[in-house]
Amino acid sequence: MGFAMYPVLLLLMALASLGIALWAFLQWQQGRSAMVLFVLLPLAALPLELLAAGLGLWGDAGESARGMGRLALGWMHITLPLSLFALATLCRRVGFAWAKIDWGHGGVCILAVLMLIYQLPDALRPGTTLAATSVVGWLVFAMFLACGAGLWRVRRWPWLLAGMVPGMLLLLLPAGLAGTFPLYLGKLLIFSAMAVTMVHFARLFPVVRVEPGE
């Protein structure tokens, strides 16, 4: 892949991720589902991260791009653990036995809060170098991978697993071997699969709101 083509591909991926994020936002607006919201929050950082990566390859935009990328990674580190709230709710609604038990569902939510507390200081501390994918991020992705396997087995819904498997394999590729392109493509696959899955099941199990006096 030529150097001149690489930033263009990153910017195209930024547009693709922005389109997915806007679509997920519109879906959330229709039903106000927390399941969609909690995956939309980290997804919203991906277009900014990809834009920063693409612009950073041009010298004049280097410093601004680094600051933009740091902001995007900080937001993603803070919000990614919160996606486990969506995961726990999804697993309960589709009928996974462990999630129907209060301590099972609640345990995942508590884990999400602990992960947030763990990552918060580094995400908010100026000057801290943030990893593109943290230990917490890997754990969150592994839990979504397991959920994807369960959804495929119980509900014959393949798309979460179909996004998580190649996405995580791409994240595992050494940067020295293939550059950072597989990393960003892996993130795009993972967050797209998470968003599509949550939107689908939010439609399947809509939240019923009772108006006062009814």
Image: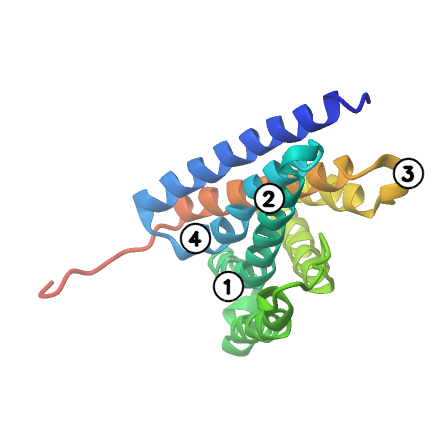
Tag on residue 37? 4
The amino acid pointed to by label 3 is Leu
In the image, residue 137 above or below residue 107: above
First in sequence: mark 2 vs mark 1: 2
> CA–CA distance between discs 3 and 1?
35 Å
Q: Nearer the viewer, mark 2 or mark 4?
A: 2
Q: Verify CB contact (< 8 Å) between mark 2 and mark 1.
A: no
| Percent x, y of residue 86 | 50, 58
Mark 1, residue position: 85
First in sequence: mark 2 vs mark 4: 4
Name the residue located 62 percent from the left edge and 38 percent from the top edge. 50
Q: Is residue 190 visible?
A: no
Q: Give the secondary structure at mark 3.
A: helix
Name the residue located 37 percent from the left edge and 53 percent from the top edge. 33
> CA–CA distance between discs 4 and 1?
10 Å
Q: Verify CB contact (< 8 Å) between mark 4 and mark 1.
A: no
> CA–CA distance between discs 3 and 2?
27 Å
First in sequence: mark 4 vs mark 3: 4
Q: Give the secondary structure at mark 4.
A: helix
Q: Nearer the viewer, mark 4 or mark 3?
A: 3
Residue at the extreme front of the image, as rendered: 60
| Percent x, y of residue 141 | 68, 55
Q: Quadrant of the N terminus?
A: top right
Q: Give the secondary structure at mark 2.
A: helix
> CA–CA distance between discs 2 and 4?
29 Å
Name the residue located 74 percent from the left edge and 43 percent from the top edge. 165
Mark 3, residue position: 177
Q: Quadrant of the C terminus?
A: bottom left
Mark 4: few/some/many CA within 10 Å (<14, 14-19, 20+): many
Tag on residue 64? 2
